[in-house]
Amino acid sequence: MKKLVSIFVMVMVTSFSLIIFNSCVKQDFDKPPIGIIPIGEVVNIAQLRQIFADSSAYTFTSDYSLYATVVMGEATGNIYKSAYVQDTSGAINIYMKNSGGLTFGDNIRVYLKNCDVSKYGELLQIANVDNDSNIIITGTGNFLEPRMVTISELNDAMESGNFDEYESQLIQFDSVQFSLGDIGKTYADADDYGERFIEDCDFNSVMVRTSDYASFAEELLPEGKGPLVAIAGRYNNTIQLLIRSTLEVKLDGPRCGAGGGGVTSIDEDFSEQQNYEDINIDGWLNVAIEGSRRWQGKTFNDEVYAQATSYNSEEANECWMITVGIDLDAMTNPMAKFETAMAYWEHDGLTVLFSTDFNGANISGASWIELDCTIAGQHDPDHEWIQSGDIDLSGFSGQGYLAFKYVGSDLNGNTTSYRVDDVKVWDTEK
Amino acid sequence: MRNITLLLLFLLLGISFRSVSQVDTLTENAVYPLPSFNLSETELEGYGENQDVSGLLMSSRDIFESTAGYTFGPARYRIRGYDTENTSVLINGIKVNDIGSGRAYWGSWGGLNDALRNQSIYTGINASNLTFGGIGGVTNITTRASAYGKGLKVTYSSANRSYRNRIMVLYSTGMMESGWALTVSGSRRWAEEGYVKGTFYDAWSYFISAEKKINSKHSIGLIGYGSPNKRGRTGIAVQEANDLVNDNHYNPYWGFQNGEVRNARIGNYHQPMIMLSHYWTMSSKTSLTSTLYYNFGKGGSTALNWTETGDPRPDYYRNLPSYSLEGGDMEQYEYRTRMWQENEVFRQINWDHMYFANSKFLNTIYNVDGIDGNNITAYRSKYIIEDRRNDKSQIGFNMNVKSELNKHLNLAGGLELVWYKGFHFNKIVDLLGGEFWLDVDKYADQVGTYTYSDESQNDLRTPNRLVKVGDRFGHDYTSNVNTYNGFAQAEFTYSKFDFYVAGNLSFSEFWRTGNMQNGKFPENSLGDSEKKQFTNYGVKGGLVFKIDGRNFISANGEYSTRAPFFRNSYISPRTRDYTVTNLVSEKILSGDINYRFRASWMKARLSLYYSKFTDQTWSRSFYHDDLNTFVNYAMTGVDKVHAGMELGVKINITTSLVATAVYGRGQFIYDSRPLVTITEDNSADVLAEDRVVYLENYYVGGMPQTVGSVGLKYNSQKYWWLGVNFNYFGDIYLDINPDRRTAEALAGYAQDDYRIEKILDQEKLPDGFTMDLFAGKSWRVNKKYYIGLSLNVSNLLNTRDLAIGGFEQLRYDHENIDRFPPKYIYLFGTQYFLNINFRM
């Protein structure tokens, strides 16, 4: 029996030792060999454009590569799963399967096998790009300079069907401003894209479109004028500029027409204005806050005046005509008057307002006081000029602005036309 | 009011009984590892950590408790539905529940079954000489060297559970003439692959207990133990994935690297304990034990992290076939379905691809470490393995005094002082072929076209920091908790009655120390936060009425308050020091009455219990991939009622044949309308603040509330036995997502919208049956040696589709509830545990 126990113990001990030695659990892993992505035939962006022109949507089934430089990545969140790249022959959008991986300045090789060349809203793109398998970053820090353009160049190119010339490129405007109708807004809406407009001093404008996911979506638009860098995007026949970073939106100079200010008298009879053209007076503002209509010059019996109406506008309208700044402190007893007329009464659409804290750009951010005066109304005959009466402005001080605000809507029949003429500001002591 | 009346009724009716059970020895010693379900933090942080103490109950003598441990434990059953913070687990009189969470982590002493088998288990409210204890009871494991008999024990076990092999050796000298006693033990548990595919197990353990008897009054003891443990974890996938693979235990955590199986989720724990004790026997009636201890070490779990690319997890909802269906892409749907079904590489993590992607992501980081012009260009890792660490360092001092004042009165009291620090940070484990990881919030918006904003910095003090293997990154904070606790107890014994009363008073404080200055919370992340302080108390009492030698009636009651746990108190401790609003102590009211019958032919116990938890705080966080961050849920004012009955009967039909029957019926429900606050880790935005959750009368989910088992066991005179159990699990409900029970969740739906019901309903899972088998034999050789052999087979019928728990995902889609479907946890199929041991 003892023998049995000894044998048992020996067997146990031996097997334990064996088991312990064999009980290593493998946890170290070898680094796997890295697959090599072949280069194949090299194409440029112009050739991709040609491939699409020849065959419309095209999927690469063999080895092709594109060498390009990233001009916009996802850094600020304005675009998603997407990047814009350029080479010397043009620019193109890359649409990837996942978010991330490309930064401004990256030199990349796009391995085109399994990728598509297609259009989304007429924007040429390389789609179905796998972030890991189709993109090789070969260098960094190649920050391409933007191409200098003007708004009308872009618009003309789009109108004449030559936008390919600019599409997806990094561009810069020398001097632009956000339109007054957008001032006071943020780059994007709370839960939606923001579609804002920049303009030059000749009312040429173009859309800046910003995602609500962009890091600067909640920032207020700058109110001044200056250089702006963007990507020239498009959706069908609408140009959509994409801002990469607000560091590249340096609109801090004075706005178009601004800088005058501080007059001590106004005597405007609109005689310089053209029939059916937007009112454009040096130092004055003419702004469409809602809808596209502004105050327009109108001629009747050789008399020129300003008119605003929603009649046949097919939209809701709000437009402001604001005088040049009035230096109230330099006047002893400032007074104002003007005349108004109305036609085809449907609603009360005109208010006359005065502000002393308007900064020349941000209408919604200023406080406006309705002036006590007589305005043409429902019971006045059509077309008859009504005198406002003398308005005493001596209660105000600082820089004052007189504003004519028209609100109407063709959609619900609020279409009364309002006219303004002979706007005068003077100092009774002089 | 009704509750109090009920409790009073219980108290009036009742008379106390102590369900004390000493440990059993040779038979039924196959304490097997419980399955541990580890849900990823990305799903539900802290949900499924192995907090099961039911393993302790296996050695209870009470038939209900041991069945709950052996048979119901693997099905996630918890006695009376209590979380483990309500059960105090003591080793040598020292409470080892984690201070930060209150939970008892079984793994901390895993593999030391033989060394830690000397256990006293008290469940429910009881008198305890060692601590005030929770309403779930007190378990003390005696590890004093002089308590071990002289001998050697060697055990080998073979199993198909989380490990496949186990060796344990225990040697004890017993008290020697020199006054020394020494016990040492060690074990090894391992598996190349456990029950679930892709899981390995690699654990050691050590134990030493030495005691020197200085004289008849004084002894000094030193105890040290630890269980270094490394294991591949298993995840819980959505049913779609399980169905595609045709396996309810599909594990999304592993994949092939160079053709070899590699797990991304590796648990890695080692938290040794060292105790120095002084045992002072002042007289034959009075003794004082003082212990100074230090418990420290690492706890971590690795996970994939990624940046600038897509989610690589195979079971991520966008990687499943159904996602293609959403976009109406049938071709892609069929392709993915086929690939999931047929291609194991496709449906698991693709390690080779991650190495490939990391090898060519050339990146320039500008102004590294905040130094202008310090630009570094290198291959940046898109994918990495990080270790999410929760290390600890705890020093404690305990004093415990016991005195038998006279034959009717026993007094006991104690002092517990704890100074705890938890260290919570991420560490890079593997860059997977890349050269660095950038320590910025990967989803923070940037300002420049190629530089990172202050807001995106994880640590403003070193902006744009490159981190490499071994570096800490992401978050790094310390949880500090100090508690000072004292209790006293008086126990009276008479011939017809026993009764006891005990009281407890404690002071605790905690605060957060940030070791990084987060760019989004520069003023609220670095350094010490405000201290939160709480004073708490508890009272309890119980009576036993001994009708005769066979019939006992007992009743117990307790009211106590408990400070909130650190882990529930901060809304987003990784990034800032904001605590939840309404941070108050939890109140616990509990009582039970018991009837016990004890005779040679039958033992039986019937218990009724009622517990009410008031003002609990509940917190979870999960990874939300549209918001690109962890989203944190904190509910305050959570009240719960746990009421039910327990019945355990053991009948000796003949001297050899024993029949058992166990039945537990509970009703564990929410009893208040808590307020939920939802925040994001990387944003100061509050998604919801103090939103009312209409939670009343929903079930506490995730476990069976009703269980039953009948068994038959044959004990041969020739030292062998054979038994069988039939088990029932019922009333299993899904753990609910509180945000779905709010007015806001229903906003926008018409009153008769069919989806309302779907959003509000709590799914009840089907009942289930299983069958277990156990057998064994022991030999005594030469009256000196013992050889034991035992075999347990659980779930003999290999039922693999019995969901024993589950939870609704916290993320949900208002429009399409099914997009983030609930996840179910299934009972494992047939598992065996074969045990052979040798003793001398």
Image (cartoon, rainbow, N blue to C red):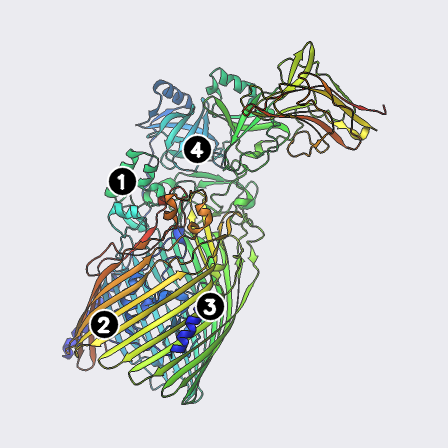
The residues tagged by marks 3 and 1 sit, at their Cα atoms, a distance apart of 57 Å
Q: Secondary structure at mark 3?
A: loop
**Percent from the top left, x then y, of residue B343?**
25, 42
Give B793 or B192, whichever is nearer the viewer. Answer: B793
- Kindly report which numbered mark, 3 or 4, lies closer to the viewer in this rendering: 3
Nearer the observer: mark 2 or 1; the answer is 2
Question: Callout 3: few (<14), some (14-19), or many (20+) C-alpha neighbours within 10 Å?
Answer: few
Between the residue at mark 4 and the residue at mark 1, the CA separation in whole angstroms equals: 28 Å
* Disc 2 residue crowd, few under 14, some 14–19, many 20+, Cα 10 Å: many
Tag 3 and tag 4, C-beta contact below 8 Å: no
Where residue B1 is drawn, which disc sits there? 3
Q: Position of residue B636 (x, y in %)?
A: 48, 58
Residue B337 is labelled as 1
Please determine if labels 4 and 1 lie on a single subunit: no
Q: Please, which chain is the residue tagged with disc 3 on?
A: B
Both marks 3 and 4 on one chain: no
Q: State the residue position of label 4.
A: A82
Location of residue A266 with respect to B358 vertically, above or below: above
Subunit ID for the residue under disc 1: B
Give how far apart the Cα atoms at labels 2 and 1 are: 48 Å
Q: Position of residue B446 (x, y in %)?
A: 52, 40
Distance from the alpha carbon under mark 3 to that under mark 4: 62 Å
Q: Which residue is mark 2?
A: B660
**Do marks 3 and 2 both belong to one polypeptide chain?**
yes
- One can see residue B31 in this view: no
* Residue lying furthest top: A301
List the single residue furthest toward the front.
A379
Q: Are marks 3 and 1 on the same chain?
A: yes
Task: Give the chain letter at badge 2.
Answer: B
